[in-house]
């Protein structure tokens, strides 16, 4: 049993558990590796950024590729599940093209039905889940997912990557030149146990007809989240009232105390299950279209946000980031392991 799975089974067996000190000390912190250049640009974070990368908006056509589900738990330095952690996933499409790789808008070579990027805000169990496709290969890298993890109270995402425990073959069935053993990211993780924990086994999901596979991956942070204070943290709960929308529709209005340059996003959970938090598109006026998923306030005061989905038990979660935090600008073009040039 892996350490991650062991921790999870303890977590499931006893709510509010605390790890004995010696075990907490023995926690293997997930290695941090470079963000790479293809985190969505600040102006181009896609409107569809929920935890399903396979289906873009309500499209009937799904992304090309093998469907994979990945789920796990975010743990803090004490081995406690982290509530309110922002988990971000982005990766190449089936053919190895990223959603944003050109620096200007969406990459025309990327599968038009692939979301390319997703976010998940953890509930009290610390669990996250994504549905996506198996990442495609591109020159110079072993197959990989990119991850960003932001704990409550943090204003910079910590980045890491996961790969596949496999011998990789390209779409023509040829053995790929770059494997995990000579990849310039995975091969730099010298601790064999930590490296092995980054290379995942996806196994077939019973009862699916599409060849879907699943893997679990837990993230062990080396830090402990600070209790958010507002402004300056990451999460608040907001009630909403019904108001009239355009053409006889109803919509829901949230009123949030806002501060200049803070960035706001809204999440709802239709079932209140931990794995069901979804980011919501919203409007800033009662009559406008739901055309954005984040808003940076320009002044202090009451910010009104309009959403379509009714609140469950009367509230939504509003995630907010400090000025300049996680703006989506690639962080300094690497700085991590690996040679200069070439995509990561
Ligand atoms: Fe990459």
Image (cartoon, helix red, strand yellow):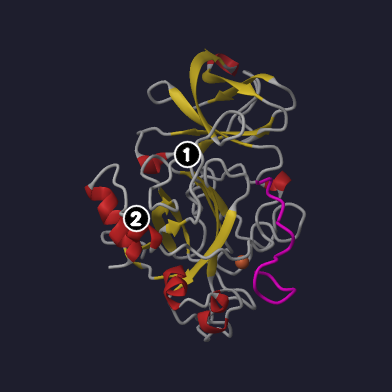
Reading the image, the residue beneath label 2 is 21
Specify the quadrant of the image occupied by residue 36. Answer: bottom right
Between marks 1 and 2 in the image, the one whose residue lies nearer the viewer: 2
Which of disc 2 and disc 1 is earlier in sequence?
Answer: 2
Specify the quadrant of the image occupied by residue 141. Answer: bottom right
For label 1, the crowd category at 10 Å Cα-Cα, with few meaning under 14, some 14 to 19 and many 20 or more, is: some
Reading the image, the residue beneath label 1 is 278
For label 2, the crowd category at 10 Å Cα-Cα, with few meaning under 14, some 14 to 19 and many 20 or more, is: few
- Taking the spot 52% from the left edge, 46% from the top edge, the residue there is 151
Rendered position, 280 above or below 284: below
Image quarter for ligand 1 equals bottom right
Q: Is residue 134 in sight in this rendering?
A: yes
Q: Which residues are magenta?
A: 326-344
Task: Tell which of 258 and 110 is nearer to you.
Answer: 258
Magenta stretch encompasses residue 146: no
Q: Secondary structure at mark 1?
A: strand
Question: Which label number is shown at residue 29?
Answer: none
């Amino acid at each position: 049993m892996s350490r991650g799975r062991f921790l999870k089974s303890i977590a499931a067996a006893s709510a509010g558990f605390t790890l004995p000190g010696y075990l907490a000390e023995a926690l293997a912190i997930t290695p941090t590796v470079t963000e790479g250049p293809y985190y969505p640009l600040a102006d181009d974070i896609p409107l569809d950024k929920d935890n399903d990368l396979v289906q873009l908006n309500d499209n009937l056509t799904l992304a090309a590729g093998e469907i994979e589900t990945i789920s796990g738990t975010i743990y803090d330095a004490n081995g406690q599940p982290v509530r309110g952690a922002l988990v971000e996933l982005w990766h190449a499409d089936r053919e190895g093209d990223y959603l944003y790789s050109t620096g200007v808008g969406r990459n025309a070579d990327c599968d038009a039905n692939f979301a390319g990027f997703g976010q998940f805000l953890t509930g009290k169990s610390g669990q996250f889940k994504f549905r996506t496709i198996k990442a495609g290969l591109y020159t110079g890298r072993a197959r990989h997912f990119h991850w960003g993890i932001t704990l409550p109270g943090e204003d910079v995402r910590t980045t890491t990557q996961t790969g596949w425990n496999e011998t990789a073959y390209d779409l023509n069935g040829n053995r790929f030149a770059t494997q995990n053993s000579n990849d310039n990211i995975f091969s730099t993780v010298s601790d064999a146990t930590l490296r092995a924990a980054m290379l995942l086994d996806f196994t077939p999901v019973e009862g699916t007809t599409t060849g879907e596979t699943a893997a679990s991956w837990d993230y062990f942070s080396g830090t402990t989240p600070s209790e958010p204070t507002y402004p300056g943290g990451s999460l608040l709960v907001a009630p909403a009232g019904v108001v009239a929308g355009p053409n006889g529709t109803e919509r829901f209005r949230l009123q949030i105390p806002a501060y200049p340059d803070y960035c706001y996003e809204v999440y709802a959970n239709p079932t209140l299950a931990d794995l069901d938090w979804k980011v919501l598109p919203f409007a800033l006026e009662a009559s406008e279209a739901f055309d954005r998923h984040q808003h940076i306030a320009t002044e202090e005061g009451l910010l009104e946000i309009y959403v379509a989905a009714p609140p469950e038990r009367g509230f939504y979660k509003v995630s907010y980031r400090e000025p300049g935090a996680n703006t989506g600008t690639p962080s300094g073009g690497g700085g991590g392991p690996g040679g200069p040039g070439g995509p990561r």
